[in-house]
Image: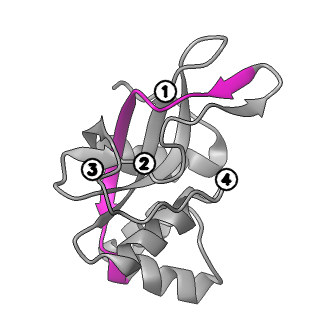
Amino acid sequence: MTLPEILNDWHDASYIIEAMGKPYAPAPVPNGMPRYRAAGCCHYNSWRACTADPRLHYVEGLARVPGINGDWLVGHAWVTLDGVHAIDLTWRGARKRAHASRSLDAATEYYGVEIPHADVTRLYVENGGPYLCLADWYRSEAA
């Protein structure tokens, strides 16, 4: 995936994703895995799943999603069991209206960075809850 320049609030994260990220292949949600699906809460859904199942790893990055006007990249969080496959607990193939001119199908491609669950939890506690924490995590690792 070639990452285009994206909005300013994603600038640091997009640089980190391009420098440290890797591709993940879409995978179905395994049988018996919790099905968190709060719309617009991918960071929380993924963190919550990792809290419930220590086999899971939290990933933040970009998902390529087919839209009415062509593919587009969406900042997103998901989990992985093996570091290769993206398990999307938020979208899971459901078609959702994201905007009058776009709708979301299941992502066709994922590209992201795994963040240790303990670090995500620490950042959530320090900053008052779930959010895009990739840039803050990177800065804390570099310090």
Quadrant in which residue 134 is drawn: bottom left
The residue at the point 46 percent across, 53 percent down is: 89
Which residue bears the numbered disc 1?
Answer: 4
Q: Secondary structure at mark 4?
A: loop
Q: Picture coordinates of residue 1 (x, y %)? A: 33, 26
Badge 1: few (under 14), some or many (20 or more) residues near its Cα, within 10 Å?
Answer: few
- The three-letter code of the residue at mark 3 reads Met
Mark 1 vs mark 4, CA separation in Å: 25 Å
Kind of residue at disc 1 = Pro
CA–CA distance between discs 3 and 4? 27 Å
Disc on the earlier residue, 3 or 4: 3
Q: Is residue 8 magenta?
A: no
Query: Does residue 9 appear in this view?
Result: yes
Q: CA distance from mark 3 to mark 2?
A: 20 Å
- Residue at the farthest front position: 32
- Residue drawn at (45%, 83%) of the image: 121
Label 2 to label 1, Cα distance in Å? 22 Å
Residue carrying label 3: 20
